[in-house]
Image (cartoon, rainbow, N blue to C red):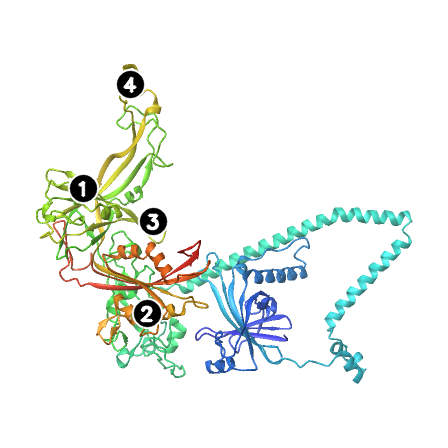
Amino acid sequence: ADAMQMQLQVGQQPPLAVKVEEGQAYGRQGNGEEWVELEQTPDLFAPGGDPLGFLVAMENVRKLAPGDQGMDDFSMPAAAQSVAYDSDSISRYAFALSGPKYARFMKEQMEAELRRKGELPPSMSLSAANQYMEMTGHGEMWLNASGLPTRLLVHVEFPDETGANESISAEIVTRFDGWAAPSDGMWSQLWHDPTLMLTQPSTVTGISPQVAQGMGMTLGITLLILGLFALLLTHRRLWAVRAAVYGLIIVSMVITPLLQTQQVSAFYDGQSARVLEAAAANLESKVETAEAAMFNPHENPIQMTDQAVASTAPASTTNSVNIAQTVSDCPTITETTDCDLDGLLDQIEIHQLGTFVDDADTDGDFITDYGEVQPFTVGGQVWYLDPRRDDSNNDGLSDSVECAARTKLDDDGNIDTTIDVSSVVCPDTDADGTPDVYDFDNDGDGVPDNADNSPFSTQTVTDGKFGLSLANYQNDKHIAIDFQIRPTAEQHLWWVNSYADWPDNDLQGQIQRVTSESLSDLGDMLLSPVLEITIPHDDANPTRGLPVQDGIDVDSISATTPITTWLDSDAVDAMAISVTEADPEDGTIVVYVPLTTAEDAVGETPVALAGRMLYEVPSGASSWGAEHTVRLLWLVNGLTDGCEVPDGLDEEAADTYCEDYANWTSEQTVLQTYYDDFRITSLLVSEDHGASAAAFAQTSAGQYYDDDLWHLADVLQRTFLTRAVDQTTNQRLSVQDIKGHLSDWDLTNIYTQEFFDLADELAMIDALTGDEILSFLGDARPSPSSGATATVLYVGEKSRRNISLVQDGVSFADNSALIDFADIEVETIGSLRWAPYAYTDGGWINADV
């Protein structure tokens, strides 16, 4: 091509343009700016300087029929594109892009360029770049009736670079026009005008002056070498000639490797220097980007002398703006327009805030852009929210959660711009002078918000223990309590699952070690935390709230009834909970709940201990009974060795039996326990009200994908997940209703397996991951071929009542916690999930995504 040009524009920013003329690349930002020479031609839109360079990597080429939907061409209107699809004069070909092929092409181009510059030694070659090897993409080529390209559409995706914040992908549209008509042959031109050979030689022969000059130099050097060779042949018998030839051979054999070594060294030095320069430039760019992107919460983001000009009064507006609204009929942006009616002038949003002029809530946090740039004072300082980030301090909690008073929605869930929130002060939960929107630990309990299940509340505990009681729960329902606690001495968090090594050959103390056995390579003693829950017997709740085996009469359980006769050990074992009888006489039971560490998402530092306790109060229990006592206990598990003389040995053999250390055995036991002080950082209580699920599979595979299954997923996303009401029954669409609606949705190619009356979420997960699903697939696809694939759509819903530490349902008094479900309503949560499977070796198995 004689010239190429690309223009890129993001939002309202000035366009970035790149053009290539006669092999030289130029760039500029803004239509009126001067073109500036670039050191190299950008390869993204024109690999190797050729816009058709992507075609060297194409594979799986197929011709598209007229009317077939192809790739979207954002450079032309949809109506014009649809006409092009149906045009008989255009042939369209779809293809995939191969990363290895593209990498090989770019490698060859780079080697040729480096050798042209004399930088790459002939004996060296480059390796293919991983960034290109792992490239993926696809494209579409349009050819006219003459077989010449008219349009090339390419989508490419490159893998994430190390340390990069985001990956690179591009949609590239290249249009070709102005193809020159084929010229007459050289002899035809000379026949009509012989003087052309003298006046326009390059036009007739197709050889440019630059190429002719290069050919002339090559020819001259070739003739010179041939002449010298002929001279040597003529005088080859002369001693002086032979000595000169031998000398040249010796010198070349010695000097050439040295020169190549120096050239290789120079190449590596040059490349190292470029890498260092690029790294420094990259670091400088990242620093500049970070500084530019850094939002100062104390600085007014609108820097104008007269703030009254910066924004219009929101009270003067009368419209509610939908969060996803796009104002397509927005007038031309001027000095006074406010396209989205959020109270901020478009000029301010474009040039100072970087927010959208057609969306009142750019970051989608339900707080208008205007509401985020209105100041408030906390701790004697002025603060502003970041209108470009839904989480101003990136602590994992949205601004609408940490400053809910600034969210203003109307009855339809749309942002109401008529309400002025400029006087609303965002809360400071722990009163440390930093508002929650910029505090990484809102409640000041030592657990950062990103790891805290109750980021707005904490509870101190005295004497290292607290009482626990439940009220207004529903009998025969699974109740899970998720504890999150933090030792008063925070360094104890680093003790979790730490090992110690007892000295070998120690027979003098209570702990004796002679064997080489150990708990792990790290030692033979392990320190682990558990939550100790002491539960006294109470006639009102004889099971103490623990799960009971099926068929057990609750009234038959007394204080002295062994727990092995009534406790549902499968339920507690599944949670790794240990239950022991502390006093068989009075019926006191001790439960040990294992604790794990909760870590800060930044740095993976342990910040709390977490564990889950399971309760299920049977219908035969009249009340909760006496409160349960909760403590933090550290267990020292270790190995201790012993020797037991077997029966049947004579006296002499028995006396010397244990002198042989080979007769000693090791036993793991709890060597010591310690109680520890702590505080409650989070308490989440959930009462399960059952779960339901269904699995759907397409009985016959689609050509490219399971289209009926995708159609079902689309329908459920718009009905089931949005809690849409069935017009015939006036009820919400549930899992039980889906199968009966398949024919209404014209889905007759779907096989269904339903799972109803599941106890809780764990039961639902177990039902959807067992062998029953593989049998279900075998029924849906009874005769698959080896290597066949299938997709299963899982639909589930779970119902439960939830209480957290911050809610009114949890109260603390006299170091006792009361969890009251009286005013807590049942919530139902629906979900959709895909799972791939593959048929191999005569059966279905789980497949990787």
- Label 3 crowd bin: few (<14), some (14–19), many (20+), radius 10 Å: few
Label 2 with label 4: CB-CB less than 8 Å: no
The residue that disc 1 covers is 564
Question: Sequence-wise, which precedes: disc 4 or disc 3?
Answer: 3
Q: Position of residue 688 (x, y in %)?
A: 21, 57
Of circles 2 and 1, the one toward us is 1
Q: Position of residue 195 (x, y in %)?
A: 81, 82
Q: For the residues marked 2 and 4, what is the alpha-carbon distance in whole angstroms?
A: 77 Å
Query: Is 206 left or right of 380, judged from the image as shown?
Result: right
Q: Position of residue 547 (x, y in %)?
A: 18, 49
Question: Sequence-wise, which precedes: disc 3 or disc 1?
Answer: 1
Q: How many marks?
A: 4
Q: Is residue 98 above or below residue 147?
A: above
Q: For the residues marked 4 and 3, what is the alpha-carbon distance in whole angstroms?
A: 57 Å
The residue that disc 3 covers is 605
Question: Sequence-wise, which precedes: disc 2 or disc 1?
Answer: 1
Q: Check disc 2 and give the amino acid type.
A: Gln
Q: Check disc 4 and give the amino acid type.
A: Leu
The residue that disc 4 covers is 649
Of circles 2 and 3, the one toward us is 2
Q: Check disc 1 and give the amino acid type.
A: Thr
